[in-house]
Image: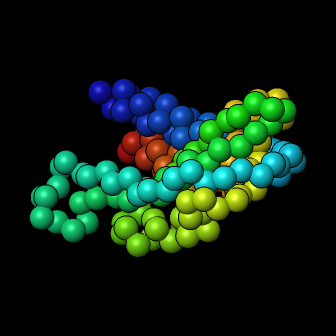
Amino acid sequence: MQSIWIGLLVLAGLFFLQKAGKDWGRARRSLRWPHVEGVVEETWVRIERDATRDPGDPQQAFYYPCVRYRYQVNGQTYTGERIHAGATEGWPTRGAAEEVLQPYPQGTTVRVYYDPRNPAEALLEPGNAGSVWVLLVFGFGAFALAAWLAWK
């Protein structure tokens, strides 16, 4: 049974590190992407509640900053929602998520960086890998736990 847990932890570690590498690579490549002007169509904060917690607990939700913008490349119109190359971070308060959205009020002209090989892939903050550090912590943490179980 212990070897099954070790195997699952190693797989989880590989998954998190692969995702972190992919996000980091996209962030690095985005520094060389061309940019065009776009317009912010909408911003909002998405709330995800933790169903395992007491509904009266103020810490039972995470708040995710969301933005939708429109841009054109070679006469083709695209819509993007990615702020940076990493996964969108969830914040413990609405105020923290709204702070991320401050530079992007509705109707604002923004600089949109797009992948020249796939213009549908775009972001607003090139070089920013977002929460890649969280993925690294989970990845290395899973490996450390697997090593501890194997040694134990």
Q: Quadrant of residue 15?
A: top right
Residue 120, position as x, y percentages in the image: 70, 33
Pick the residue in front: 135 or 81.
81
The residue that appears at 81% across and 32% down in the rendered structure is 75
Locate the C terminus by quadrant: top left
Locate the N terminus by quadrant: top left
Residue 59, position as x, y percentages in the image: 25, 66
Could you tell me if residue 44 is visible in this image?
yes
Residue 7, position as x, y percentages in the image: 44, 29
Pick the residue in front: 130 or 140.
130
Left or right of residue 78: residue 89: left
The residue that appears at 34% across and 58% down in the rendered structure is 62
The residue that appears at 56% across and 51% down in the rendered structure is 41
Pick the residue in front: 141 or 152.
141
The residue that appears at 41% across and 31% down in the rendered structure is 8
Residue 4, position as x, y percentages in the image: 36, 27
